[in-house]
Image (cartoon, helix red, strand yellow):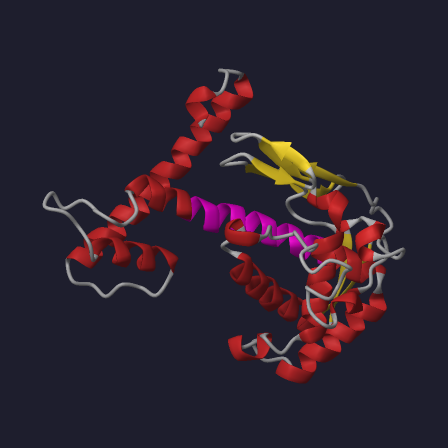
């Protein structure tokens, strides 16, 4: 990817940063592989699972024959640890902004969290029982999807919506526009109404496949469940210990810089409870 970019100042900086990230990840992977080769038990995390799977099937040269190449392992780590962290942090930012605008929903979410966990650390089993929190996160993702558009490429000649597309055509799916289409979501499409997800994603709109914030089909976001679990955990801990509201300096101006972000930041006043 980076070899095809023009050698502008920003592109050269991006290439340098990418090489540095890959070098760090390569070091971590090599260290973990040496430990596993010396008999150390694999840690039950993403990297450990990837490497353990690769080491189960090697050829006569000691290279993975069916597993992932080292470049693929590095890219998977970049995807989960960098892209995953960015999108989840943006989701939490918008959630705190929206709950500051709608304190009644903030109170409902806090009541649910405290009812399940009190002030104790949220446990995995309980996170799946957070109905109100889940509805809030889905509605925030609808209004402010981290990825405002995603692309697909036709692999053969096909008809889509009555239009014939040849093989090799790139099609952009405007997620942000679809998530704000009144013909799909109703006349209240621009309102924050988490209860539209009370019966699940498929019944939240007039089309069961309209919620595209994580993509759809075989290319749906591989980290969807992890991201939701992470967001529920973080939001629960915030609600347990803090009340929050928007500062007077906050200006609502969503804009896209890779992900959909508040242009002027998120100035939020927080009070410990």
> How many marks can you see?
0
**Closer-to-camera residue (179/239):** 179
Residue 225 at what x, y percent from top left?
54, 62
User: Residue extending furthest left?
Assistant: 60
Please, is residue 132 above or below residue 161 in the view?
below
- Residue 29 in sight from this viewpoint: yes
Q: Residue furthest top?
A: 7
* Picture residue at 10% right of the left edge, 46% below the top: 60
Image quadrant in which the C terminus is located: bottom right
Relative depth, front residue between 103 and 59:
59
Q: Quadrant of the N terminus?
A: top left
Residue drawn 62% across the image and 39% down it: 159
Please identify the dominant SS of the magenta region. helix
Identity of the residue drawn at 74% across and 47% down: 178
Rendered location of residue 211, percent (x, y): 68, 55
Look at the image and say whether residue 201 sits in the magenta stretch: no
Residue drawn at the location 60% of the way across and 54% of the way down: 88
Please state the horizontal and vertical placement of residue 80, each as a whole percent of the image: 47, 51
List x then y, in percent, for residue 148: 68, 42
Residue 266 appears in the figure:
no
Residue 78 part of the magenta-drawn span: yes
Q: Which residues are magenta?
A: 77-95
Q: Which quarter of the picture shows residue 227?
A: bottom right
Whether 51 is drawn above or below 258: the answer is below
């Amino acid at each position: 990817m980076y070899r095809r970019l023009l050698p502008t100042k920003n592109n050269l900086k991006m290439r340098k940063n990418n090489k540095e990230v890959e070098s760090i990840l390569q070091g971590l992977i090599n260290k973990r592989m040496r430990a596993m080769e010396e008999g150390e038990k694999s840690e039950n995390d993403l990297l450990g699972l990837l490497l353990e799977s690769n080491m189960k099937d090697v050829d006569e040269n000691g290279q993975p024959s069916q597993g992932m190449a080292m470049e693929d392992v590095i890219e998977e780590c970049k995807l989960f640890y960098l892209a995953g962290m960015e999108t989840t942090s943006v989701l939490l930012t918008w959630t705190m902004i929206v709950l500051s605008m709608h304190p009644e929903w903030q109170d409902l979410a806090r009541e649910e969290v405290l009812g399940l966990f009190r002030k104790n650390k949220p446990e995995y089993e309980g996170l799946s029982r957070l109905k109100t929190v889940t509805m809030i996160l889905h509605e925030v993702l609808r209004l402010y999807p981290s990825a405002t558009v995603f692309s697909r490429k036709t692999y053969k000649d096909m008809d889509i919506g009555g239009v014939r597309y040849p093989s090799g055509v790139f099609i952009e799916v405007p997620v942000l526009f679809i998530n704000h289409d009144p013909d799909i979501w109703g006349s209240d499409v621009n309102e924050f109404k988490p209860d539209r997800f009370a019966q699940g994603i498929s019944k939240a709109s007039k089309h069961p496949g309209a919620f595209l914030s994580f993509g759809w089909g075989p290319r749906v976001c591989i980290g969807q469940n992890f991201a939701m679990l992470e967001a529920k955990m973080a939001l629960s801990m915030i609600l347990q210990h803090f009340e929050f509201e928007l500062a007077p300096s906050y200006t609502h101006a969503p804009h896209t810089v890779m992900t959909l972000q508040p242009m002027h930041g998120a100035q939020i006043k927080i009070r410990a409870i």
